[in-house]
Image (spheres, rainbow, N blue to C red):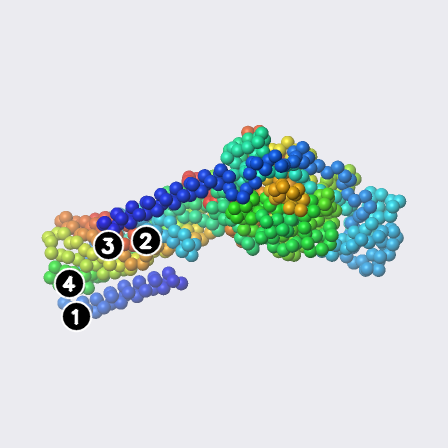
């Protein structure tokens, strides 16, 4: 319920701010054009996740490889659709609802990524620009099977994790340099997910749906966009709060 | 930055001091905990039974009694007419299973009467009143270390006694990090009673219990065996006194069905099981057994019915295999409903006297096991603790583990708990008999594997 509420808040925030911004723009004379920008991205983050009613925590370390298409549907207003692959490490997560409790220590679990982004300029004056950025990412983990060691009969476990992350907030750009635009990103950053684990040991069968959520709701990132040429730009971003991570993106403009 | 440095240094000093004090504590514990019976008491200790486990020598069933169940359709008048015809003297009725206990006439044998009764169309079933007896008796009084819970390779008894093999134990200390049990989990010890005033267990008793031998509600132990068994399961632990029990926080429900000689009739056991289930027992420990493999007779159906009834009410039943190097005794041999426990020793070898057969599920340490002894039965100047051997001593280790599993995973049913205990056992005789075998079953129990999360490190 809490997660749904968070999600709703994020969506409403994006819609409100976007509508507000669109309304402002409608009063301005802007050039309407749709352009397409393919972007390749890589992201790493290591985030504390809490589970079992927040009594326990471990780290979720994820590598995200993304390909997105950014549609500039209006000048300064981008919509993106995102696809990709993720490798997620849930080491340290313990499943105590199973007949035999197990702790994951096997490294990464691959999965597919789906998502979308929205970016809209809402303020611009002199060398300063503020835009609103929102992102929604869904990581659908692949099913993975493990042997449970140490027992005197054959024992196996089957797991399938998924997580969803929403980020929304204002990005403050400084555009006083040529080709190089540093920025500060304050955001609402929420991650939640489920790890379904099933255990089979002869006739002894159990399953656990473990819900987890990322620690911290508000984030701070710093980054910069570097325009290599008129058609190619690079972006680097480092997350400082509520977790450590970084993003590298290369965008090509037609 | 300076603040971060300061905090880091402070944190490191804090962690270092914690680990240093923790090591010191462990060191003290390994030397000699306070209030423990120390080595100087050794000279005051007498040897009992030459270190051998107890073996019952009497008849396999009561020579003057039978248990009879009549057809459900029969009226009380019809039952009275039948008993009059057979000249049976009613002793009592076990209401929980609708079985009558009769004294038989002097001029007829149990076998002849049973033959006749079982031919009678009004009788559903008749059987002897089997004798159940202890699967162990004490041999020495001493306390030094409980190798059964944590075996560091120490001497297992007084000076000159054998030295144990390191890690030939049930891995209790690792498991206690995960759980020490819950107070709401109740372990019934159906035995000779429990010393209700023993300082190392009196706070752990759920009630004063039930005494079916003297027919009252004071299950005081007049033999010693039940107190010893109860101590292994759940002696007061971490109290700087005496010994540690397997299930630190679980409660004991004493049920006395065996007399001061350690012998009892199966009808009392049936009543004891029924009462324990009614009182809410989650686990029942039965460190006794009966030989029901008698030519011309079948094992007690009434006993099996009581055991099955408890099993179906989600109670874990744990029973001793016996100490005769022979077939598994009953109730341990009720394979579908009971965990049958064999005895292993301080070297993780099967005790040579431990009974064997396909019914054996697991083994647990049962040689030179130290536990409580009734203060009333302890001579002045002696400590109320003794060493004993037997599958009776192995069984409460398993009952304690079952209680811990029930504590940490109360949603599991009895079959699942039994499987966890079986599948997590260490196959201690795998070089001779890989897999489940007739001697130690799946192996010596491992509390660590049963309770501590298993690390998954490799995918299929």
- Report the Cα–Cα distance between label 1 and label 4: 15 Å
Labelled pair 3, 2 in contact (Cβ < 8 Å): no
* Chain at tag 3: A
- Return the mark for residue A124: 4
- Report the Cα–Cα distance between label 3 and label 1: 32 Å
Question: Are discs 2 and 1 both within one chain?
Answer: yes
Residue A183 sits in which quadrant? bottom left
Question: Are discs 2 and 4 both within one chain?
Answer: yes
Question: Are discs 1 and 4 both within one chain?
Answer: yes
Residue shown at the point (36%, 52%) measured from the top left? A49
Q: Name the residue under label 3.
A: A221
* Chain at tag 1: A
Residue A205 seen from this side: no
* Chain at tag 4: A
Question: Are discs 4 and 3 both within one chain?
Answer: yes
Side (left or right) of A23 relative to B450 = left
Q: Position of residue B389 (x, y in %)?
A: 63, 37
Q: Name the residue under label 1.
A: A27
Q: Earlier in the sequence, mark 3 or mark 2?
A: 2
- Which class describes the residues within 10 Å of circle 2: few (<14), some (14-19), or many (20+)? some
Helix, strand, or loop for circle 3? strand
Side (left or right) of B162 relative to B330 = left
Q: Earlier in the sequence, mark 1 or mark 4?
A: 1
Which residue occupies the foreground of this view, A12 or A237?
Answer: A237
Q: Where is residue B413 in the image (x, y as percent from the top left)?
A: 57, 51
Camera-near label (3 vs 2) is: 3
Residue shown at the point (24%, 59%) measured from the top left? A186
């Amino acid at each position: 319920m809490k997660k749904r509420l968070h999600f709703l808040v994020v969506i409403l925030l994006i819609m409100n701010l976007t509508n507000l911004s669109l309304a402002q723009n409608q009063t301005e004379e802007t050039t309407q054009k749709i352009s397409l920008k393919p972007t390749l991205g890589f992201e790493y983050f290591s985030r504390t996740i809490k589970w079992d009613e927040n009594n326990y925590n471990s780290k979720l370390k994820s590598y995200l490889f993304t390909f997105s298409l950014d549609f500039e549907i209006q000048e300064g207003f981008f919509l993106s659709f995102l696809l990709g692959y993720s490798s997620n490490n849930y080491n340290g997560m313990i499943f105590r609802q199973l007949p035999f409790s197990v702790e994951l220590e096997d490294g990464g679990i691959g999965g597919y990524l789906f998502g979308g982004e929205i970016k809209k300029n809402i303020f611009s004056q002199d060398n300063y620009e503020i835009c609103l950025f929102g992102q929604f990412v869904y990581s659908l983990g692949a099913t993975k099977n493990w042997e449970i060691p140490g027992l005197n009969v054959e024992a196996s476990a089957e797991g399938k994790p998924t997580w969803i992350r929403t980020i929304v907030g204002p990005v403050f750009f400084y555009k006083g340099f040529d080709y190089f635009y540093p920025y500060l990103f304050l955001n609402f950053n929420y991650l939640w997910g489920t790890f379904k684990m099933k255990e089979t040991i002869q006739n002894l069968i159990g399953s656990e749906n473990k819900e987890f959520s990322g620690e911290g709701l508000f984030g701070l990132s710093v980054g910069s966009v570097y325009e290599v040429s008129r058609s190619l730009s690079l972006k680097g971003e480092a997350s400082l709060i509520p977790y450590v991570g970084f993003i590298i993106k290369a965008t090509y403009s037609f | 930055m300076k603040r971060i440095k300061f905090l880091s240094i402070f944190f490191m000093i804090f962690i270092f001091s914690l680990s240093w004090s923790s090591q010191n504590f462990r060191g003290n514990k390994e030397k000699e905990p306070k209030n423990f019976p120390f080595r100087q008491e050794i000279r005051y200790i007498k040897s009992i039974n030459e270190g051998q486990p107890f073996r019952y020598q009497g008849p396999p069933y009561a020579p003057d009694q039978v248990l009879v169940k009549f057809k459900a359709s029969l009226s009380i008048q019809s039952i009275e007419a039948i008993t009059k015809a057979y000249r049976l003297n009613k002793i009592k009725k076990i209401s929980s299973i609708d079985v009558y206990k009769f004294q038989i006439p002097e001029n007829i044998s149990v076998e002849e009467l049973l033959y006749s009764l079982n031919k009678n169309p009004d009788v559903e079933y008749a059987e002897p009143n089997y004798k159940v007896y202890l699967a162990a008796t004490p041999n020495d009084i001493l306390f030094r270390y409980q190798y059964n819970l944590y075996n560091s390779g120490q001497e297992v008894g007084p000076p000159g006694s054998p030295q144990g093999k390191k890690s030939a134990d049930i891995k209790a200390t690792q498991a206690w990090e995960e759980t020490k049990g819950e107070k709401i989990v109740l372990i019934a010890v159906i035995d000779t009673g429990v010393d209700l005033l023993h300082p190392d267990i009196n706070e752990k008793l759920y009630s004063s219990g039930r005494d079916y031998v003297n027919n009252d509600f004071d299950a005081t132990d007049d033999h010693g065996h039940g107190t010893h068994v109860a101590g292994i399961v759940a002696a007061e632990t971490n109290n700087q006194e005496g010994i540690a029990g397997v299930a630190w926080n679980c409660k004991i429900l004493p049920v006395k069905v065996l007399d001061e000689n350690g012998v009892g009739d199966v009808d009392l056991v049936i009543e004891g099981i029924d009462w324990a289930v009614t009182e809410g027992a989650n686990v029942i420990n039965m460190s006794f057994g009966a030989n029901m493999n008698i030519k011309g007779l079948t094992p007690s159906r009434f006993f099996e019915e009581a055991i099955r009834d408890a099993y179906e009410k989600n109670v874990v039943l744990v029973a001793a295999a016996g100490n005769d190097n022979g077939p598994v005794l009953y109730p341990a041999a009720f394979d579908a409903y009971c965990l049958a426990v064999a005895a292993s020793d301080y070297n993780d070898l099967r005790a040579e006297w431990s009974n064997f057969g396909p019914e054996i599920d697991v083994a647990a340490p049962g040689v030179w096991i130290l536990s409580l002894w009734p203060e009333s039965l302890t001579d002045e100047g002696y400590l109320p603790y003794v060493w004993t051997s037997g599958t009776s001593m192995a069984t409460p280790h398993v009952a304690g583990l079952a209680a811990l599993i029930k504590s940490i995973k109360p949603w599991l049913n009895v079959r699942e708990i039994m499987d966890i205990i079986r599948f997590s056992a260490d196959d201690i005789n795998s070089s001779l008999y890989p897999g489940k075998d007739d001697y130690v079953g799946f192996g010596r129990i491992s509390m660590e594997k049963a309770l501590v999360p298993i690390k998954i490190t490799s995918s299929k």
